[in-house]
Amino acid sequence: MAKKQKRNVSRQSTVSRVTYTEAPAVVGEPRAATPSRNVGAEFNPDYGYVIKDLKRIGILAGSFFLVLIALSFILK
């Protein structure tokens, strides 16, 4: 097996130094608070396909359990 060698990696600062200055304050009439979302529209997702899939999974699981129970009596 080959002998491992350590490499010296110099770390350079990738973050440049930035000086921030304060923006001048804007003087004027105050703005009215605007709502960020539409109050009239409600979030009403349709999960009908999920319910169908869950029913299908339940039916399959139930049928598999019935098959297993029937096989346990038959193979005894």
Image (cartoon, rainbow, N blue to C red):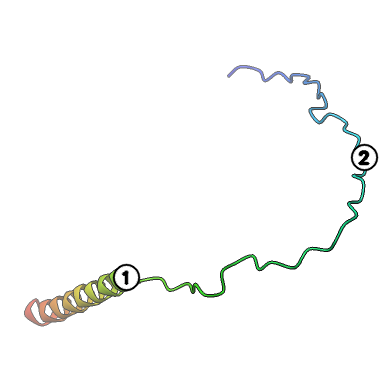
Marks 1 and 2, the one that precedes in the sequence: 2
* Residue 6 image point, x, y percent: 74, 20
* Residue 31 image point, x, y percent: 78, 63
Tell me which residue sits at (29%, 69%) in the image.
Answer: 49
Residue 3, numbered label: none
- Asked if residue 58 is positioned above or below residue 36 in the image, the reply reads below
Tell me which residue sits at (21%, 79%) in the image.
Answer: 62
Residue type pointed to by label 2? Thr
Nearer the observer, 17 or 24: 24
Q: Quadrant of residue 32?
A: bottom right
Mark 2 nearby-residue class (10 Å; few <14, some 14–19, many ≥20): few
* Residue 25 image point, x, y percent: 91, 51
Regarding mark 1 in the picture, which secondary structure is present there?
helix
Nearer the observer, 67 or 58: 58
* Residue identified by numbered label 2: 21
Q: Quadrant of the C terminus?
A: bottom left
* Residue 52 image point, x, y percent: 25, 73
Residue type pointed to by label 1? Val
Mark 1 nearby-residue class (10 Å; few <14, some 14–19, many ≥20): few
Would residue 63 be found to the left or right of residue 37 on screen? left
Would residue 67 be found to the left or right of residue 20 on screen? left
Tell me which residue sits at (29%, 73%) in the image.
Answer: 54
Q: Quadrant of residue 50?
A: bottom left
* Residue identified by numbered label 1: 50
Would residue 63 be found to the left or right of residue 2 on screen? left
Q: CA distance from mark 1 to mark 2?
A: 53 Å
Q: Quadrant of the N terminus?
A: top right
